Amino acid sequence: MCVDAEDVIEAARQGLEYTGQALPDCKLTPNNLEVTEWGKAVEHLHDPLYPEVVGYAEIARLAGVTRQRARMFPKIVDFPKPVIETAQGALYTKSAIEAWLERRTCRAKRA
């Protein structure tokens, strides 16, 4: 939500008021307030709201292994935890998988 206000306090007050009007039956507790200049906010309008996630097919491609091998990775102690569980399988943040693969590659190179 964007509001036009003279200062941060007024912006927060307006934001809470508008949200309360839109969702009158909800008891809301704000847990985050981000203040940004309008121009900078516009620059980020198309940024994704959620991190990119990958399943076993993408993990296999990133790791250069088969999908069957990628499905065994969660048994490895330091493998990242899934962020979403679906009927089709677990999904992991791509950045966590890339970092895990980088750590494993570094260890393999040192050995």
Image (spheres, rainbow, N blue to C red):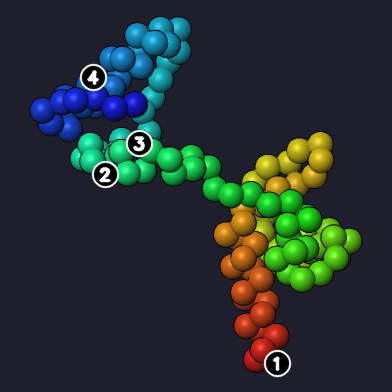
Numbered circle sitting on residue 65: none
Residues at marks 2 and 3, CA–CA distance in whole angstroms: 18 Å
Image quadrant of residue 108? bottom right
| Label located before the other in sequence (1 or 3) | 3
Numbered circle sitting on residue 32: 3
Residue denoted by label 2: 40
Q: Position of residue 70 (x, y in %)?
A: 81, 62
Q: Nearer the viewer, mark 3 or mark 4?
A: 4
Residue toward you, 42 or 79: 42
Q: Secondary structure at mark 1?
A: loop
Q: Residue furthest right?
A: 68
On screen, residue 50 versus residue 60, left or right, reads left
Q: Is residue 76 above or below residue 20?
A: below
Residue toward you, 31 or 66: 66
What's the amino acid at mark 4? Gln
Question: Residue at left 66%, top 71%?
Answer: 101
Residues at marks 1 and 2, CA–CA distance in whole angstroms: 46 Å
Residues at marks 2 and 4, CA–CA distance in whole angstroms: 20 Å
Question: Residue at left 76%, top 38%?
Answer: 86
Numbered circle sitting on residue 111: 1
Residue denoted by label 4: 14
* Neighbourhood count class around disc 1 (C-alpha, 10 Å): few under 14, some 14–19, many 20 upward: few
Q: Position of residue 103 (x, y in %)?
A: 62, 76
Circles 3 and 4 in contact, beta carbons < 8 Å: no
Q: Secondary structure at mark 3?
A: loop
Is residue 75 visible from the viewing direction of this image?
Answer: no
Q: Nearer the viewer, mark 2 or mark 3?
A: 2
Residues at marks 3 and 4, CA–CA distance in whole angstroms: 15 Å
